[in-house]
Amino acid sequence: MRLVTSSIALAFAFVGLTSVEAGQVRSYSSSVPVRRSSYLVEFHDDAHDGHYHAVRSHGGVTVDHHYDGVFRGMAVSTSASVNPEHLAGYGGVKHVWPNRLHRLSTRASKFNATSQVLHEKTGLIQTVNELGLNGSGVKIGVIDSGVDYMHPDLGGCWKTEGCPWQYGVDLVGDSYDSQSDNPIIKPTPTPMDCIGHGTHVSGIIMASGTQVRGVAPKATMGMYRVFSCPVGESEGDSDDSLIIKAMELALKDGMDVVSMSLGTAGEWTESPTALAAANLVSKGVIVVAASGNDGEAGLLTLGSPSNGKGVISVGSVNNWSYKSPYIEVTSPSAGTLRFLKVYDPMSPSKFVFKIPVSLAISKDAAGSNEGCNPSSTDIKGKIAFVKRGTCTFDEKVAIAQSAGAKGVLIYDNKPGAPITPTLSGNNTIPATVIKLTDGMTLAALAAKESLTLTSTNDEFATFEMEDGGEMSLFSSYGPTQELDVGVDISAPGGSIWSTYPHNDGSYASMSGTSMAAPYVAGAVALIKQANPGLLPEQVRNILTATAKPVADPKTGQKYTPFQSGSGLINIYDAAKSRATIDPPTLALNDTVFGPFTGVIHRLTGDSYRWASRTLKIKNTDTRRGMWISMNHTAADSVTMFNRNGTLVDAAYGTSGKTIPTWPASTKPVAGNTLPKVTSLDSNQYIGPGLTGLVTVFITAPSGLNEADRWFYGGYLDFTMRWDGESTQSSYVVPYGGYNGDYSKINMMPPASTGLPAFVDDDGNNVKNVSAALAAKNNTHLVFFMNMPTRLLTVDLVDAAGKFAGYLPYGYNTNVVRTLPTYAPYFSVMLNGTVYMDKDLTKEATVAPGKYQARLSTLRTFGNPKKSSDFEVWNSQQFTVG
């Protein structure tokens, strides 16, 4: 199966999508980047040496890696003549996977963040001052792009006595070009970073300097380099085989914690890296992974391996304050004013003016100050002052440059932190962006008096971040494909100032869940230092139970757990915790509609969509009894659907759009539009070292229309007080569900979208399929998926309704939903060829006759053996031959 990357109304190219299971072979279509002629061979648990030897001895096979810790099998490279079916045919082989490529994903950060406020909000400063925790004795392995270990804030050493870096290896080298037919993997002696990502991540964990202070500066570190330098068309890639090998080495080196700031959006929990991460957890290693940076596309964007069983999946919260280079503007009436500017140390545009330069508003003949047309005002030798909008940043700069301007100062057209400008470097004058409010102040002054400006990149000032403490827009959402909440916890990840390779400025600001995950990894090290005997699941439970739900200022509620998990990490409360709650998160994936049962029914008698769950609350203090009470806080409900069943614009990646939330504002709403929680045993006493049970009944927001497909959630807020103590401790359990019957949700959009549809190579609708096939014109069936599915088939049925074969790429398992960055459209080709088996190995030519294309998708929780559990679309009839 293939997918189309651009709108059907435009000329488009076919690129692939999802995984296809052919017997024991799993393959990815062309949109999923894979390393050519490279495979992961997974063996059954009872496979023996003879099975391994048979694969190793197959002609044209070279073994790249052996695995025996987190993945049972090997990675192989093959000659072009080797069919993966041959490898899958050997005894003991469970699956053969293509070796999928990975690329690091971060967001351009607007500012350079200070650390003091950040560390206060997460409880780190209190943890250090009162408990003296610093990560000593705990081993943290980082799987990333390497590290500039010579950076003075990171130790300035490698594997010497007293050096924090005692473990690690380069697995990839500097010359790995994933697009090459013969990629070069030539590891260097040490995992030196040439991208910067791994150095930035490492600083968040363990830096000890005047500019950056990591969470666990005394931890013992390991760096497992799996991302190469940019080479050819490769941007610095890695692949499944390298990442799994790094996990194996981290396990053998005895790492207590593994941090991974990498992943692929929307994947199922059966992906190789998710399986390996889950196996690493099962062997006693605490695995922390970034949830992903695809949140602007809405729900079901959670990345792999963060969705692996037991892995701590981390979302991103924006930083509260930042330090940034600034501009100073001198005004006759207002004096000297200081404004922050967007600063990117890697940008080709350096907005530096040490000698005062005049600032002038650029207006065109129509009076617009957006700088998209030639200026009618004199800006020669001055800084052109324009507003964001209508044309690109590069176009604004080019127009100002042609008028003789020395630089361009752009003010944003939206409130909040200013956007980082996308500049190609083709222009020769510099440009930067300031906030809307600052721009309006300057515009008012510039309209009535002469202003001068100075700017350097050497001096910094501290500013408050307007959206500090809010969830980062880019932070990915759950749920998982089967309605588990997905995200566990959140940490600072938006605009984080950390270490960077010394050849590239030594420090930089970056944004992403890539920055949030190492913060949690450092916190885990502190928890392990305080309680060395804790198991991975216990650490995960403690961290999530002691987190603080994040307030959404736009709605007056809390952010949905599907994005924030249990909330912002609180390291101090986690380190001091004396209670555990199991399960740590409630997935409401089996709600029923009707009256409550038992005692609750006698109290209410009404019908609701509801679910009940029982929590085990353990008092881990063996000396003091514990009193508990429970309240409830509703969170935002979110959807990615319009009422007609189509996806909202944001789900397709439309810039500036966000998925709908309820409430839509801070105005009061009817109580029945929010979820509710009822319990009869939430107030009780639990003796020293004992466990109590609390049963809760959670009702969906009955006042919301189920046709809108809302995903709702909230938090069970527990207060604990121990005997003889006046202070109380807070604990939280997030929950999430779907306001409707999830097993009946439509997998495909409605017919009103015009899809599925037959199109030609240029994306034009094919009105007469029979004529197109007779003329041997390429004809494609294109469609998209609202929801992920475990099984999707595209086949032909004859005039009698009988199966006539699967189309090429017509049998697919573990299919993701439509994702703008990964799987915007799906397509299969009608070319006269079908396959008579689900393995897609028994090729046949379609006999002359009348046929229909049939698209079948298994509904969530559906049974593939029950035809009623499939959503089916049938095309119009056409003639072949």
Image (cartoon, grey):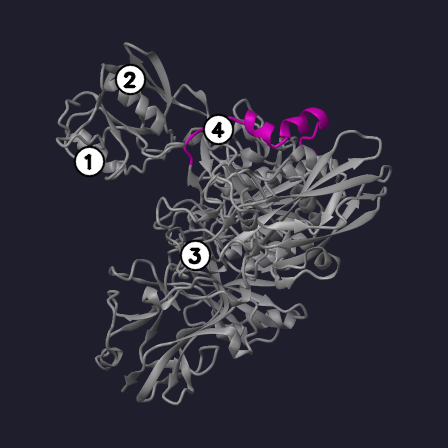
Using the image, determine if residue 122 lies above or below residue 87: above
Q: Amino acid at mark 4?
A: Ala
Amino acid type of the residue that numbered disc 3 sits on in the rendered structure: Phe
Separation of marks 1 and 2 at Cα, in angstroms: 22 Å
Q: What amino acid type is highlighted by mark number 1?
A: Cys
Q: Which residue is mark 1?
A: 372
In the rendered image, residue 662, in percent from the top left (x then y), is placed at 49, 47
Q: Earlier in the sequence, mark 4 or mark 1?
A: 4
Tag 4 or tag 2, which sits nearer the N-term? 4
The quadrant of the rendering that contains the C terminus is: bottom left
Assign a secondary structure to mark 4.
loop
Q: Is residue 428 magenta?
A: no
Task: Identify the disc placed on residue 113.
Answer: 4
Q: Nearer the viewer, residue 720 or 592?
A: 592
Q: Is residue 440 left or right of residue 73?
A: left
Q: Cβ–Cβ below 8 Å for labels 2 and 4?
A: no
Where is mark 3, residue-wise? 641
In the picture, the quarter occupied by the N terminus is bottom left
The answer to whether residue 46 is left or right of residue 212 is: right
Mark 1 and mark 3: Cα distance apart in space? 36 Å
Residue placed under numbered mark 2 in the picture: 453
Determine the secondary structure under disc 3: loop
